């Protein structure tokens, strides 16, 4: 039995390890967009589906004994490509839509080996079902082992592999483990014999077709779980806390639900099944609650993940309860689950971002789950159904208009209202689904009610959700990306030329440009935002912006006035900054401003020792590089301290707090000119960067980066310290 458990666990471990390694290698080359991770997940689901269909088809046609010979051959074929041969990425301008470009690169790199690994779980389960082993009557236990391997890979990657190993070292270890997997399968083939007579006994049951309704149920339950965990990841990334490490939590919850429900003795609390209606209702409420920002960040994340766990437990419980009675239909069962997961991933990563400016995939996932809830024998009376709908109108439409802060009784009243109404709606499947469909269609309107903001424009693309809106209280127009303010500007035409926010004249970057310490004849800026720094351009000093997202350029041009009223020349170069900068002339800039670190996930390819060498080639002899490192959750000071020490640069930092038109911002400058560094310290009140920080961990490079040691957990937990749940 161990000879089947080990390759099942190891193949799933390797499957998820290569997912994480490749996604990390790809992420910086597409601007750090979360959708890269989402697109990679869809690719992995597509190949997993292809592997399941392949194994299902040939296991049925050849039988287990004959197929095992094919299986062993498949295991050794990828050695002709990766993992024995290395692969190299060549990223330039994207000729395809982002997700299609990612798909193509994945196909030509890890496609073959990923396909082979994707067949392993079905093969070992069929192998067990057709063996002489006593455990043959419950091969589904190996599926729990497979998910345990996936979970182990997910858990160990950020805390062990990514933190202590370079990408190259990770791939080397992965190659060794793949060879172990291949030879373990060869050993198992010699030791674990199949039972031909068992196949003959199954032939009768194979002739009995599975009902279409049952197949569709497997499909929808498989899709629901994937839609839910991917959409919770989106919410956490866009609306709560853009910390990449948090991306693994929803996926880990999804896998854990599979482990608990598919293990030898399945476990799922009965109260989850009994009260799935109110659980769906609470989950729907949390979608809007996360946008109102009344609760601490940590508490919102915990609640979102708790409801995700309950829902995934329900969907996985329904799957194991509806599994086929005969192991002959086992492979079809997994094919449909995989197909559902692939379709759910497509819906979340491809379709909805094209058709919606909101995160309605979360509500769509809840609708899928609601459609899988069995219809109770007793229907809900009309008056009770009407009362439930009225209560929901009060909860979703009226409550947010009257509650602007946290109050215990108002929250208690809200949760009781949601519980009672959804408990009743669960008794009428059609009305339940109709209500959720209504919430989905009204979601854009509901979001404006909960946020109390009238959006001038709201747009979603592969890099997140952008919102442009007016703030009458402060007399400014704002551009927000997820939870991050990317720029603001006065309504008043007489004040429109005043730079605001992180870039005000009192800010570190503003005062630096005004004092002209570096005597700049040309300035390069990575990251456009609203184009606020345009106000520091001069006839003798143009500013070149390098911007990845074309939509940001459109927002800055159409809805803000900084670039149009700039006192000097302003140019915008679209595309990945690192690729575009390499095309610029050497020695072109006297000052290079890297403004890609103001709150979202860190594009590590723009802040490491290798890219700094590229920056220096584009700088004049006495120039400098300024990094914007304002970030609620990531502390980049140790990273820059190590990079500065490695390159022999002087490093200084300046933190200016909220005052007047200035918003708190932190900037770090690196220069190799001692005279200008001295002026920064003595004339501009910059502080030398603490050199002791350079001893904290390994230096970032193109081959190594990890945000785990520099995550500011105190900031994540800060709101909890002042939060009093008993506030009346």
Image (tube, rainbow, N blue to C red):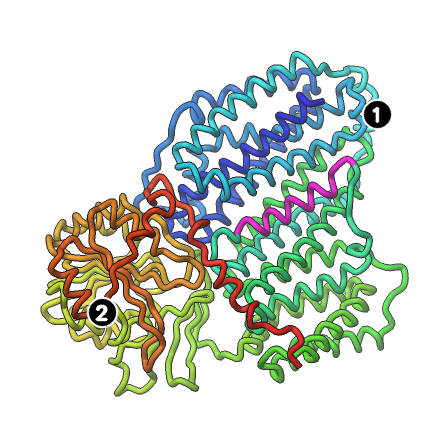
Q: Residue furthest front?
A: 692
**Magenta stretch encompasses residue 558:** no
Identity of the residue drawn at 65% across and 12% down = 190
The quadrant holding residue 516 is: bottom left
In terms of depth relative to the viewer, which is nearer, 327 or 594?
594
Residue behind mark 2: 685
Image location of residue 192, percent across then percent down? 70, 16
Query: Residue 559: in sight, yes or no?
Result: no
Mark 2 lies on a secondary structure that is loop
Residue 588 vertical placement versus 19 (above, below) = below
> Closer to the camera, 273 or 122?
273
Other residues around mark 2 within 10 Å, as few (<14) / some (14–19) / many (≥20): some
Q: Quadrant of the N terminus?
A: top right
Q: Is residue 435 left or right of residue 644?
A: right
Viewer-nearest residue: 539 or 436: 539
* Residue 165 screen position, x and y as percent: 42, 36
């Amino acid at each position: 039995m161990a000879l089947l458990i080990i390759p099942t666990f190891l193949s799933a471990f390797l499957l998820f390890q290569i997912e994480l390694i490749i996604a990390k290698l790809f992420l910086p080359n597409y601007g750090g967009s979360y959708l890269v991770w989402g697109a990679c997940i869809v690719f992995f689901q597509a190949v997993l589906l292809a592997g399941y269909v392949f194994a299902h088809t040939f296991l049925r046609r050849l039988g287990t004994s004959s197929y095992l010979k094919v299986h062993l051959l498949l295991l050794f074929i990828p050695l002709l490509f990766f993992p024995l041969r290395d692969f190299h990425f060549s990223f330039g301008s994207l000729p395809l839509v982002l997700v299609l470009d990612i798909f193509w690169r994945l196909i030509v790199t890890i496609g073959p080996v990923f396909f082979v690994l994707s067949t392993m779980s079905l093969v070992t389960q069929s192998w067990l079902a057709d063996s002489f082993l006593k455990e043959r009557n419950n091969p589904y236990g190996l599926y729990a082992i497979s998910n345990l391997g996936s979970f182990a890979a997910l858990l160990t990657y950020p805390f062990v592999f990514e933190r202590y190993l370079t990408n190259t070292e990770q791939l080397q270890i992965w190659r060794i483990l793949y060879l172990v997997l291949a030879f373990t399968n060869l050993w198992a083939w010699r030791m674990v014999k199949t039972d031909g007579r068992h196949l003959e006994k199954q032939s009768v049951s194979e002739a009995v077709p599975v009902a279409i309704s049952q197949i569709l149920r497997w499909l929808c339950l498989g899709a629901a779980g994937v839609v839910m965990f991917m959409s919770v990841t989106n919410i956490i990334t866009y609306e709560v806390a853009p910390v990449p490490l948090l991306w693994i939590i929803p996926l880990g919850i999804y896998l854990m639900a599979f482990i608990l429900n598919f293990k030898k003795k399945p476990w799922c609390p009965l109260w989850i099944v009994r009260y799935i209606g109110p659980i769906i209702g609470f989950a729907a409420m949390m979608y809007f609650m996360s946008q109102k920002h009344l609760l601490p960040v940590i508490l919102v994340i915990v609640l979102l993940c708790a409801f995700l766990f309950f829902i995934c437990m329900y969907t996985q419980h329904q799957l194991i309860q509806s599994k086929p009675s005969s192991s002959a239909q086992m492979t079809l069962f997994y094919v449909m689950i995989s197909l559902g997961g692939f379709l759910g991933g497509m819906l979340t990563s491809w379709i909805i971002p094209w058709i919606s400016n909101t995160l309605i995939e979360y509500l769509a996932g809840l609708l899928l789950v609601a459609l899988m809830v069995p219809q109770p024998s007793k229907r809900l009376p009309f008056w009770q159904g009407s009362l439930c709908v009225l209560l929901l109108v009060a909860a979703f439409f009226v409550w947010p208009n009257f509650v602007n802060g946290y109050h215990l009784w108002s929250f208690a009243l809200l949760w009781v209202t949601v519980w009672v109404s959804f408990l009743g709606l669960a008794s009428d499947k059609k009305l339940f689904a109709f209500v959720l469909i209504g919430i989905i269609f009204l979601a854009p309107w509901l979001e404006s009610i909960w946020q109390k903001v009238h959006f001038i424009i709201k747009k979603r693309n592969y890099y997140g959700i952008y919102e442009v809106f007016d703030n009458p209280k402060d007399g400014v127009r704002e551009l927000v990306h997820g939870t991050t303010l990317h720029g603001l500007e006065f309504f008043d035409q007489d004040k429109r030329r005043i730079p605001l926010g992180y870039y005000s004249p009192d800010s570190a970057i503003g005062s630096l440009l005004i004092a002209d310490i570096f005597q700049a004849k040309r300035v390069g800026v990575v990251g456009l935002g609203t184009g606020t720094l345009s106000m520091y351009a001069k006839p003798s000093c143009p500013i070149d912006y390098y911007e990845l997202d074309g939509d940001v350029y459109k927002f800055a041009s159409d809805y803000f006035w900084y670039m149009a009223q700039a006192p000097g020349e302003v140019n915008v170069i679209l595309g990945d900054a690192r690729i575009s900068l390499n095309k610029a002339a050497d020695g072109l800039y006297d000052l290079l401003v890297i403004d890609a670190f103001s709150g979202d996930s860190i594009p590590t390819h723009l802040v490491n020792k290798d890219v700094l060498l590229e920056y220096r080639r584009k700088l004049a002899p006495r120039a400098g590089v300024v990094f914007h490192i304002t970030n609620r959750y990531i502390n980049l000071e140790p990273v820059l301290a190590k990079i500065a020490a490695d390159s022999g640069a002087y490093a200084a930092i300046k933190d200016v707090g909220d005052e007047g038109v200035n918003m708190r911002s932190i900037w770090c400058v690196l220069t190799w000119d001692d005279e200008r560094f001295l002026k920064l310290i003595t004339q501009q009140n910059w502080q030398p960067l603490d050199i002791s920080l350079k001893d904290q961990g390994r230096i970032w490079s193109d081959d190594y980066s990890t945000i785990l040691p520099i995550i500011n957990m105190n900031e994540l937990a800060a709101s909890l310290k002042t939060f009093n749940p008993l506030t009346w």
